Image (cartoon, grey):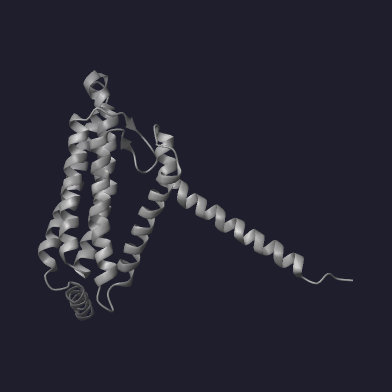
Amino acid sequence: MEPLRLRRAGLNAAFACLAAPGARGIARAWLAAAVAALGASGLLALLVVAARAPGLGHSAALAAAFPRALVVHVTYGVTAWLAAGAALVWTLLAPGRAAVAGAGAFWAGLVLVGVAGVAGGGRALLADYVPVLDDGVFLAGLGLLALGAALAAIRALARAPRGASAPAVAAALAFLSALATVAAAGAALPPPEAAADYGRTFWAAPAAATVASAERKASAAATAGADAPRGA
């Protein structure tokens, strides 16, 4: 039992060092956002299952609600839940006004996504990993979710103390890089109209970077082969 007790004490000490002064209040807001998103996603999962259940699935109202409920369920249960959990850690690293503003924007995004799911009029577009409602309110909500988490990530990169958790800092950098690639793809591609268009917006930039890297390696290999001395 003694090694286990020492291990727990070490984890508690590490967490105490991680949490910067003043972080707990805003961290609670991020924790509440994560729990709210996960809870709402769970409730919507019941609606999604009911829409495909024998007997209940024949209801025209449930059949019509299924795609919209599925989009909001995934948005809350994957996008919002994971982003809020990451922002919680980033806030513990570097609390401040940016983190407070980020939490406010994130909560506003959660509300707009829910409103769009209930009262919006756009089509449900089941794009890979990030399904969307083709509705201005939903897209604004999705943007606020990204903005809120991005503010917390930027704050963590700029103000995290020395010796802070390297994985958390690396995750902040990866998150901001992902947002930048999506923005680059959105600027380079025509306005999305179908699920496949949104799929290209979300994934075209990383794919383009992978292709460009492979082309550079192939070109370098070809140049090295051309410059190598030929055998007699």
Q: Quadrant of residue 53?
A: top left
Q: Is residue 140 above or below residue 150?
A: above
Instruction: Please state the horizontal and vertical placement of residue 71, each as a whole percent of the image.
Output: 29, 36
Instruction: Please state the horizontal and vertical placement of residue 7, each as a whole percent of the image.
Output: 23, 77
Q: Quadrant of residue 23?
A: bottom left
Instruction: Please state the horizontal and vertical placement of residue 3, each as a whole percent of the image.
Output: 23, 80
| Residue 57 horizontal side relative to residue 214, left or right | left
Q: Quadrant of residue 124?
A: top left
Q: Nearer the viewer, residue 204 or 16?
A: 204
Q: Nearer the viewer, residue 165 or 120?
A: 120
| Residue 215 horizontal side relative to residue 8, left or right | right
Residue at position x 13%, y 73% in the image: 21
Q: Nearer the viewer, residue 208 or 53?
A: 208
Would residue 42 be seen by someone viewing this image from the given angle?
Answer: no
Q: Is residue 25 above or below residue 229?
A: above
- Name the image quarter holding the N terminus: bottom left
| Residue 99 horizontal side relative to residue 187, left or right | left
Residue at position x 16%, y 49% in the image: 107
| Count of number-bearing discs | 0
Q: Is residue 208 above or below residue 49?
A: below
Residue at position x 23%, y 37% in the image: 137
Would residue 166 be seen by someone viewing this image from the given angle?
Answer: yes
- Name the image quarter holding the C terminus: bottom right
Instruction: Please state the horizontal and vertical placement of residue 120, each as a whole percent of the image.
Output: 22, 30
Q: Is residue 55 above or below residue 102?
A: above
Residue at position x 43%, y 47% in the image: 185
